[in-house]
Image (tube, rainbow, N blue to C red):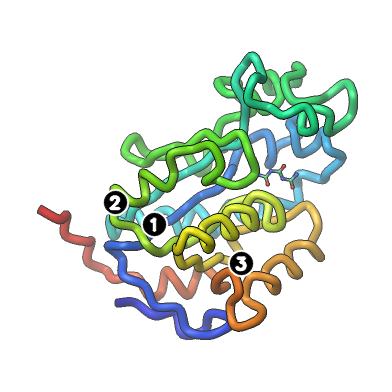
Amino acid sequence: MLTIAAARPGPYSFDLSTTALLVIDMQRDFLEPGGFGESLGNDVGQLRSTIAPLAALLAAARAVGMSILHTREGHRPDLSDCPPAKLSRGEPSKRIGDPGPKGRILVRGEYGHDIIDELTPLPDEPVIDKPGKGAFHATNLDVLLTERGIRSLLVTGVTTEVCVHTTVREANDRGYECLVLADCVGSYFPEFHRVGLDMIAAQGGIFGWVADSAQVRAALPTIPLQPSS
Ligand code: TIU
């Protein structure tokens, strides 16, 4: 059992074999100009501070053989899985499915929909395509986690108060324990980021725990997990 002593609201203990690193929506459409994030009027540069600590955490998690899963928010090319209320967000000329400099906005298979080069998943790391903000809604994430015996999630990605928050709430209701890594999640709005993290750890950890990724990296063993036989 590993323990992150400096987590909020208190120490977070987890077993490597039942814990997964979840990387939420680190896609060009949210982190680079010309995508969905910018079409909503956001400064995408606000999210880029998450990339370096997340790359370091990914490398450390891979080195010890942790389960790692990635998600991407996006839709089928015919947009049949995009509710009208979601489709109508953003500037009229740049809505989901419209052409942009990185391909059709938030559509699966397009360049902008894919994960940024710095965090490219390895072939054995599942990539879950999700049509909603939460990673459990209309996906097989719960099945994949159950198959792997996962009960605890290290949660990273963007944005803190939207897809990260929704996913943590969904996970909490399904009985998963969540440690959200403050420097590996980001928002277009610094205030929402701060308050979003406070909301998770408040009331004795109503949705989960919060810590910095350096604390997790320091706690990881130097010897990889033994694959279960
Ligand atoms: N708009 C915003 O902050 N986020 C999203 O639309 N999706 C995710 O958070 N991934």
Instruction: Determine the residue positioned at 56% across, 55% down.
Output: 170
Instruction: Determine the residue positioned at 27% across, 68% down.
Output: 222
Q: Is residue 4 left or right of residue 228?
A: right
Q: Earlier in the sequence, mark 1 or mark 3?
A: 1
Q: Is mark 1 within 8 Å of ligand 1?
A: no
> In the figure, residue 26 lies in which quadrant?
top right
> In the figure, residue 85 lies in which quadrant?
top right
Q: Earlier in the sequence, mark 2 or mark 1?
A: 1
Residue 1 percent location from the top left of the image: 29, 77
Q: Amino acid at mark 1?
A: Ala
Instruction: Determine the residue positioned at 89% across, 29% down.
Output: 91
Q: Earlier in the sequence, mark 3 or mark 2?
A: 2
Q: Amino acid at mark 2?
A: Arg
Quadrant of picture, ligand 1: top right
Vertical arrangement, residue 164 with respect to residue 99, above or below: below
Q: Are marks 2 and 1 in contact (CB under 8 Å)?
A: yes
Residue 152 percent location from the top left of the image: 41, 64
Residue placed under numbered mark 3 in the picture: 182
Q: Secondary structure at mark 1?
A: strand
Residue 20: mark in rendering: 1
Gap between marks 2 and 1 measured at Cα: 9 Å
Residue placed under numbered mark 2 in the picture: 148
Q: Secondary structure at mark 2?
A: loop
Vertical arrangement, residue 107 with respect to residue 193, above or below: above
